[in-house]
Image (cartoon, rainbow, N blue to C red):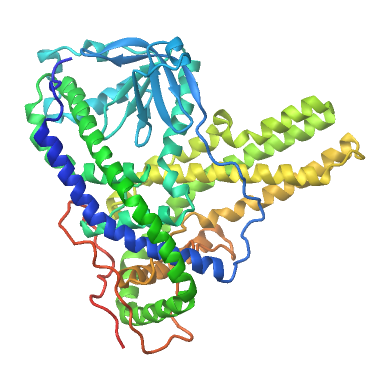
Amino acid sequence: MGGRPSSPLDKQQRQHLRGQVDTLMRNFLPCYRGQLAASILRQISRELGPQEPAGSQLLRSKKLPRVREHRGPLTQLRGHPPQWQPIFCVLRGDGRLEWFSHKEEYENGGHPLGSTALTGYTLLTSQREYLRLLDALCPDSLGDHTQEEPDSLLEVPVSFPLFLQHPFRRHLCFSAATREAQHAWRLALQGGIRLRGTVLQRSQAPAARAFLDAVRLYRQHQGHFGDDDVTLGSDAEVLTAVLMREQLPALRAQTLPGLRGSGRVRAWAWTELLDAVHAAVLAGASAGLCAFQPEKDELLASLEKTIRPDVDQLLRQRARVAGRLQTDIRGPLESCLRREVDPQLPRVVQTLLRTVEASLEAVRTLLAQGMDRLSRRLRQSPSGTRLRREVYSFGEMPWDLALMQTCYHEAERSHGRLGQLAAPFGFLGMQSLVFGAQDLAQQLTADAVATFLQLADQCLTTALNCDQAAQRLERVRGRVLKELPEFEGDVLAMGSQALTTEGIYEDVIRGCLLQRIDQELKKTLGANDVSCTLDGCLEVPWEQEGADEETEAEREGGTCPRQPGSGAQIQPLCPPPSGTFQS
């Protein structure tokens, strides 16, 4: 297929990319170091502070979310010119997709023809939708592809396609032999894309939270105040996406005019060039983070030793600074919130709650059906072997892609509603929210299943007959289902910074915003005990008790230079004060 450069990247281009990655790391790592300190402080204060009463009595499942391995024959559009060729495809447990020339090559431990991590991909099963997307990559050539060079291989109908599209990588085009095989691969690939994408968001490690906060601050310093899906993936993949977004406009302007061929041919060549750039940037980001790893490990250990003995003093200092900030900005902030936030908040809350409520209702239904099935099986056939098989199937429910699909589909249906937040708020993180709702559904299902099985094990004895045992299971069923609704108010939980003027300033504004959100959630849900709290946030009420009047906050920020960027045109509600706060 025409339009493909003989060498995607020359020596000068590779050197330029290395320089761009080096610049990114120099500007990002100071942000990361500062957020590591904030994250350690947050963790220690959470450990030593008063423990809030648990919002739910569900046990935490010890099983970690995992990608279900899947394998089978497919055909793939590959080669130059691209042609449909048979392959044997394998989805690994780490979310990597590999393809081999045939099944025996895989079974004999041979090297794959190709492989890719599923991070950032979007799966399409409509050929028409994929072709529209391909046409949009080179809009200046729409309509001329039949005149210059026919794209017959893309026009030939594909019965059961599986198109994997990525904003910065080569597209992968597969086809299954049957609708059933297509459905199974769709579930497997979607699960791999989600779990590969939310690895940082699901992590409880201080370094993961610090990294995500550092990325947000770095992008704000670049002028990007909106929200999007750039933080999906591992740390190296996230930094690669950040740099690719920064470089994409210039890359398009420099490269697209030189690509030959029809619109779709040029689009195909464009994705191959992007793939080469992405691979070079990813290698550089991985090397930079790997080089930083020993320093990070040493820094985390040092922060733990220095912060823990002085945590009370640090928290008092933070409270004093926050109290003074609140006094300084309370009037302008309240005015800004009344003008900009209050009119929009009901709409935002309704949109976000609908994203989660439908998924949680599907979780409730799925759990109820599974527990009812166990009770019926106990009454109808008390066979130990049959019952153990049912119990095992119930325990595997959170990891069963087919069973969980109903819950996941409810979250996917909200994608369009979430897109309505883009224009008024510059919010483009729809996929992250959908993945978050799906992760929540899976975690709740896993916790509920673990709770049910443990309670059932405690209350069932050999002295009970089948009817008595079934009645006890029904009581356990009611107890487990009763806990689920209490999670609805936790959807908007957020993190915080600590002991930098900029970080404390953000906490103050977020605390005020969360008060508004709490009020709106209570009105929307009709509950008196719904609380949307910061996850570990050291939030401070307006009236500070015990805050000393004399204070000095040492600014730890300022390590990331503010550079112009092409972010969303959304400004902070109130610009943060400059300088340090002194007595």
* Residue 538 visible (yes or no): no
Q: Is residue 436 left or right of residue 335?
A: right
* Residue 286 locus on image (x, y percent): 30, 42
Q: Is residue 182 above or below residue 531?
A: above
* Residue 273 locus on image (x, y percent): 18, 29
Q: Nearer the viewer, residue 521 or 511?
A: 511
Q: Nearer the viewer, residue 541 or 246?
A: 246
Image quadrant assignment for residue 383: top right
Q: Nearer the viewer, residue 168 or 524?
A: 168
Give me the residue at 19% from left, 62% from top: 561
Q: Is residue 127 above or below residue 573?
A: above
Q: The C terminus is located in which quarter?
A: bottom left
Give me the residue at 42% from left, 47% from top: 200
Image quadrant assignment for residue 62: top right
Q: How many marks?
A: 0
* Residue 137 locus on image (x, y percent): 20, 30
* Residue 57 locus on image (x, y percent): 67, 55
Image quadrant assignment for residue 297: bottom left
* Residue 198 visible (yes or no): yes
Give me the residue at 30% from left, 15% from top: 77
Q: Is residue 242 left or right of residue 249?
A: right
Q: The N terminus is located in which quarter?
A: top left
Q: Is residue 211 above or below residue 397?
A: below
